[in-house]
Amino acid sequence: MPDPTALSRPAYLALAEQFARAIESGALPIGARLMPHRKLADALGLSVQTVSRAYDELIRRGLIAGEVGRGSFVLSPSGEARQPYLPNRAGAVIDLSILKPVIDPAHLERFRQGFGWLAENLSAGAALSFRPQAVMPRHWAVAVDWLGGLGVPATAAGMVITNGVTPALTAAIMAVVPSGSGLAVEALTHHTIKPLCGYLGLHLDGVAMDGDGMIPAALDAVARRGHLRAVYLQPNVINPLARMMPADRREELVQVAARHDLAVIENDSLGPLISDPVPRLASLAPDRVIHISGFSKYTVPGLRLAYLHAPPRFATAVANRHLVAHWMATPPMVELLSHWVREGVVADLATGQARALEARHDMAAQVLGAWMPVAHRRSLHLWLSLPTGWAEDGFVAQAQLCGVAVAPAQSFRATERDRKEAVRISLGSTGAEELRRGLTVLRDILNQAPEVPLPTI
């Protein structure tokens, strides 16, 4: 219980500081549930608003997480920003933890050729201008044509080009989810969402899902509480389960979003690989969907660019948030992207990536056998639910002791409700033969009793 006699003004900051010290000292352990806002306010003689601001400040610092209907809980000091991949590839470890496209020497040669073209054709504006309006408009037209080919109704007025999906996602969330309000995501979501919402002071709601993605009735129930402003979805195989969301599920979700006037942020980073005739969310609800289409996951990792498109009601806010957070995408790289889009290079790389991923899925099915999970054949990864008895941290540790790195599911969880132990396995992060060896190690571990070996000295 905080000490009410030590609450200097502003009271919400003083209260937050007392909680922060208690968390740092261990007096409030990881996982501890804080008192409900009103109960604590009554006990301290404060307003509910003051307590709410204090809790929001602790969320912003990454010290607690708040879940509507469950309360607020103390986070692990490193848990809110835990990344799923190895920060550095160590020694002989087969790294299946980081999500990358399948690449070969031809990709590097294509990139070098692209820079050769750029050296001969770089415009003065792209090299010398600080003004986005002087550089980007002619590239917006290229982006509109590209998105139109994907079935996304886009206009130049709604276009922003960013240095990859993460800046696009940041700008979109900042534009449509004010501080203190809520963002709904699937229970398993993009690994940067949870820390980003903590940094921005947003409430993150992990909504129940099944094999087809977010459950519409569950989103409706959360939205009825009144704090949500937007929903973030990854319908096209980039999601943790590596599945395609069916057309009827997409329609139901945009109907729920319309009923509660929610913005929808659609991450379509692998869209060009998908030949299945399923409409983008942006085509179902063009007035409320902010669409993100990245390039580095299926062309060349160094082409860190994305098209961010917003409908008229959000376009100015999205452009402003990107401007203050990132100013503009790197102009010479945008020149190269536009050239590659016009000349068909991006489309060729997407076609080649689709073939390469299908071959990787065939290999994985051959090696894993009965352990092979359900996944779209053009996904970059597999989502492996672990058998009874395995905790994911133990499985990850044993795999690494055996020379293979995989990503724990913890990094992708927006909520601990209905927790299922799982790991993510990247299929494109290494060469084919090394992938085969790594998958063989994982299969052998799965066939053993779930016991983590002790490390040797």
Image (tube, grey):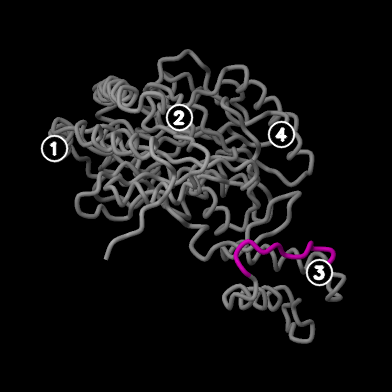
In the image, taking residue 206 as reference, residue 393 lies left or right, namely left
> Mark 3 belongs to which amino acid?
Leu
Quadrant, the N terminus: bottom right
N-terminal label among 4 and 1: 1
User: Residue at horizontal 67%, vertical 48%?
Assistant: 182
Instruction: Classify residue 230 by image quadrant.
Output: top right
Mark 3 = which residue? 40
367 inside magenta stretch: no
> Residue 218, labelled with which disc?
4
Mark 1 = which residue? 112
SS assignment at label 3 = helix
The boundaries of the magenta stretch are 29-40
Question: What separation in Å lies between label 3 and label 2 (alpha carbons)?
Answer: 42 Å
In depth, the one of 425 and 118 nearer the eye is 425
At label 4, counting other C-alpha atoms closer than 10 Å, the crowd grade (few under 14, some 14-19, many 20 or more) is some
Q: Indicate whether 32 appears above or below 431.
A: below
Question: What separation in Å lies between label 1 and label 2 (alpha carbons)?
Answer: 31 Å
N-terminal label among 4 and 3: 3
Question: What separation in Å lies between label 1 and label 3 (alpha carbons)?
Answer: 61 Å
Question: What separation in Å lies between label 2 and label 4 (alpha carbons)?
Answer: 21 Å
Q: Nearer the viewer, mark 4 or mark 1?
A: 4
In depth, the one of 121 and 109 nearer the eye is 109
> Mark 1 belongs to which amino acid?
Arg
Mark 2 = which residue? 242
Q: Nearer the viewer, mark 1 or mark 3?
A: 3
Which residue occupies the extreme bottom position in the image? 5
In depth, the one of 256 and 139 nearer the eye is 256
SS assignment at label 2 = loop
Can residue 111 be seen from the camera position used here? yes
